[in-house]
Image: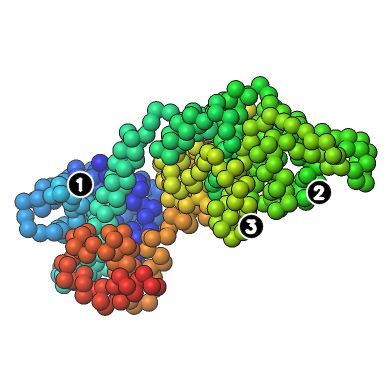
């Protein structure tokens, strides 16, 4: 079934509505296949003709519309016509009804309303409108406004605005199909997904996460060194923790050192300890982290940031399990499992000579590469819910949920900061949501919302020459459509309701051929 509410927010449709209203003073509404009004409730929509909204909120008038539309659709079903122009009795003015057809099925219609057919006697019809609106209890003011703005449209002019109304119908169809395809894809992905959605504190049930979980299962008891690689915020530390706390060493210390945090000297003394008097300020012996981690796990974070000198010292611990505290001559021995993480490409660093090859191989016994969030978008809903539930844990109020639209926005964004960025986004949204029970799209940050608008038609004009505005829109729709269909002109022509030859001509006219577009 078509989800009508969605379409009110679509940029292309909004722009088409604006053009229709500014050029012809025409309002459009959606109905389902039975002719019932769909989309946003009339009282919440700003109509260009106040009489339209006044009437649509009246039951008798909207029921009459439902009847009229369902009868008309029935007739259109058995005719060759693509639309029908009717008089809407309660208002006295005319409507154009354009069916929304998918696979020869009528899914609903777009109704354009608020004009008068100029073939008829003008003053008679205006008087009629005045009478009808008054009979429906419209105020004097609303009636005057309706009368003064109503447009008489010549028969031969119908085709111009109807083309736009048909575009709206076409856009509804395209988007509906797109959404259905996406929903099916999500459903399929969910089917493919394993049953495990969690490993310790790690959330995710996408395929990459499932393979990560089974890898973790295999290596947790092995005791071998693990190198975790992945972009910022992908959960490298979380993985290191999961390895330790699921291993035989779980009751022994888990020690973390960020290797980029200190200069060499400090880092060395942090890691290996020092003896009293070895440098100014070393007033007594200090145990290093390696000794503290004995029998446990040592997590060397940001390993890619260690200096060549440090790399040699680390190599020795890895090779021999030994080290020498700063200022000492005595070698110490420890039994630690080493985990290391970095967001750098160590292999490349080895090739460039900035990271020791021998250390790289010692660390890289088992390699875990954590996929960025944009490569496992199926996890977004689960993660988002998890973060919402987690940050609300301490508060008594009910659990907040994301609206479908908000979730779609999250889905469309590319998340360069990965899971951490999503976590921050959810915390921000929670604050903004205040007492509301739902997290809606407008509570998301601009970067997330903007990402979504890309690929949609940007800023069609509503002023200037109509022809230019239409050409702008046409060009934009073709451009977007070409990208979306992967330059499948037959498919796009069908979607746009024009012939393939017609589309090719337009592509030529606007300079939209593939080579130029990929360059630009
Ligand atoms: N799969 C996940 N499930 C739940 N929370 C996650 C997941 N991955 C990451 N997080 C959360 O995202 C934040 C960042 O994770 P973490 O610190 O482990 O990432 P990182 O890869 O070490 O990041 P950086 O490269 O910045 O050091 C943490 O708050 C963590 O709890
Ligand atoms: Mg980290």
* The quadrant where residue 353 appears: bottom right
In-image side of 210 versus 281 (left or right):
left
Q: Is residue 186 visible?
A: yes
- Foreground: 492 or 78? 492
Q: Residues within 10 Å of mark 2 (few under 14, many from 20)?
A: few
Numbered mark located on residue 265 in the image: 2
Front position among marks 1 and 2:
2
- Measure the alpha-carbon separation of dots 1 and 2: 72 Å
Numbered mark located on residue 354 in the image: 3
CB at mark 2 closer than 8 A to ligand 2? no
- Which quarter of the frame holds ligand 1? top right
Residue appearing at x 50%, y 50% in the figure: 415
Q: Please state, as top left, top right, bottom left or bottom right, where the N terminus lies in the image.
A: top left
In-image side of 308 versus 329 (left or right):
left
CB at mark 1 closer than 8 A to ligand 1? no
- Measure the alpha-carbon separation of dots 3 and 2: 19 Å
């Amino acid at each position: 079934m078509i989800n009508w509410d969605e379409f009110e927010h679509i940029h292309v449709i909004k722009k088409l509505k604006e053009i229709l209203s500014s050029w012809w003073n025409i309002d459009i509404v959606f109905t389902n296949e039975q002719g019932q009004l769909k989309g946003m409730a009339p009282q919440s929509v700003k109509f260009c003709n106040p009489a339209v909204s006044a009437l649509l909120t009246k039951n008798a008038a909207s029921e009459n519309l439902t009847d009229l539309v369902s009868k008309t659709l029935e007739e259109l079903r058995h005719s060759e016509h693509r639309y029908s122009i009717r008089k809407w009795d309660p208002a006295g003015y005319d409507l154009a009804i354009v069916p929304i057809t998918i696979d020869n099925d009528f899914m609903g219609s777009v109704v354009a309303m608020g004009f008068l057919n100029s073939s008829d006697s003008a003053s008679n019809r205006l008087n009629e409108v005045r009478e009808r609106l008054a009979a429906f209890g419209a105020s004097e003011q609303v009636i005057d406004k309706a009368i003064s703005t109503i447009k008489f449209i010549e028969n031969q002019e119908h085709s111009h605005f109807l083309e736009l109304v048909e575009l709206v119908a076409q856009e509804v169809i395209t988007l509906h199909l797109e959404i259905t395809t996406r929903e099916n894809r999500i459903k399929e992905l969910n089917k493919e997904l394993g049953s495990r959605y969690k490993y310790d504190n790690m959330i995710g049930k996408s395929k990459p996460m499932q393979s990560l979980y089974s890898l973790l299962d295999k290596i947790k008891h092995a005791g071998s060194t693990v190198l975790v690689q992945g972009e910022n915020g992908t959960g490298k530390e979380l993985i290191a923790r999961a390895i330790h706390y699921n291993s035989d060493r779980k009751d022994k210390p888990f020690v973390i050192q960020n290797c980029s945090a200190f200069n060499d000297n400090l880092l060395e003394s942090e890691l290996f300890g020092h003896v009293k008097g070895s440098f100014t300020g070393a007033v007594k012996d200090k145990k290093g982290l390696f000794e503290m981690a004995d029998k446990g796990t040592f997590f060397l974070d940001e390993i890619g940031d260690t200096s060549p000198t440090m790399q040699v010292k680390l190599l020795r611990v890895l090779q021999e399990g030994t080290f020498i505290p700063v200022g000492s001559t005595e070698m110490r021995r420890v039994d630690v499992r080493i985990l290391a993480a970095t967001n750098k490409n160590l292999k490349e660093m080895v090739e460039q000579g900035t990271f020791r090859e021998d250390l790289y191989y010692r660390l890289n016994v088992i390699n875990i590469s954590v996929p960025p969030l944009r490569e496992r978008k199926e996890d977004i809903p689960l993660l988002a819910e998890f973060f919402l539930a987690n940050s609300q844990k301490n508060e008594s109020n009910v659990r907040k949920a994301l609206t479908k639209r908000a979730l779609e926005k999250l889905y469309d964004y590319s998340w360069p900061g990965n899971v951490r960025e999503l976590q921050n986004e959810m915390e921000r949204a929670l604050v903004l949501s205040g007492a509301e029970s739902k997290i809606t799209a407008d509570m998301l940050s601009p970067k997330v919302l903007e990402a979504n608008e890309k690929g949609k038609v940007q800023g069609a004009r509503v002023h200037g020459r109509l022809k230019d505005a239409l050409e702008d829109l046409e060009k934009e729709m073709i451009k977007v459509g070409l990208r979306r269909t992967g330059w499948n002109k037959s498919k796009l022509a069908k979607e746009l309701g024009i012939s393939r030859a017609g589309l090719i001509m337009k592509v030529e006219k606007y300079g939209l051929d593939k080579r130029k577009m990929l360059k630009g």
